[in-house]
Image: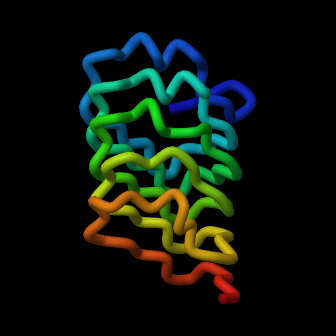
Amino acid sequence: MFFENGIVPDTLSNLQELHTLSMTNTPITKMTDKLATLQRLQSLTLDKCSLTDLPNLSGLSNLIRLSLPNNRLSKLEGLIKVNSLLLYKNLFTKIPILAVPEALRRLDMNYNPVTN
């Protein structure tokens, strides 16, 4: 997949029936804010994408699996009922406690520069 300037276009929001989105080793630096409109999305994998930022994910009310390893992320917002959260090999300096939902059963933050 190729995205102009490394930005996922807003047309992603046209995929309203999408349950699983996986983009591995895709050179993207920015995800569209429209991602949060995919209300049926249950699994999101963005592995090795060079992402530095993600939009607030609170609109993804059915998201239960979020896999974001091997990026350049340092913050995360808006998780509601995710039970599996893979954040290894990013730039988190602390565990995003405020973003972690009560439903969480698996959290992997290996290889982050966590300081405390």
- Quadrant, the C terminus: bottom right
Q: Residue at x 49, y 82 (%)?
A: 110
Residue 77 as seen in the image, left or right of residue 68: right
Q: Nearer the viewer, residue 92 or 7?
A: 92
Q: Residue at x 51, y 57 (%)?
A: 99
Q: How many marks?
A: 0
Residue 39, how many percent across, how many down? 34, 25
Q: Residue at x 54, y 61 (%)?
A: 98
Residue 51 as seen in the image, left or right of residue 12: right
Query: Outermost residue toward the right?
Result: 5
Residue 93, how many percent across, how many down? 69, 76
Q: Nearer the viewer, residue 102 or 23?
A: 102
Residue 25, how many percent across, how many down? 51, 51
Compared to 36, does 58 lie above or below?
Answer: below
Compared to 69, does 42 lie above or below?
Answer: above
Compared to 17, does 102 lie above or below?
Answer: below
Q: Residue at x 69, y 35 (%)?
A: 6
Quarter of the rendering containing residue 22? top left
Query: Outermost residue toward the bottom?
Result: 116
Residue 17 as seen in the image, left or right of residue 72: left
Residue 73 as seen in the image, left or right of residue 62: right
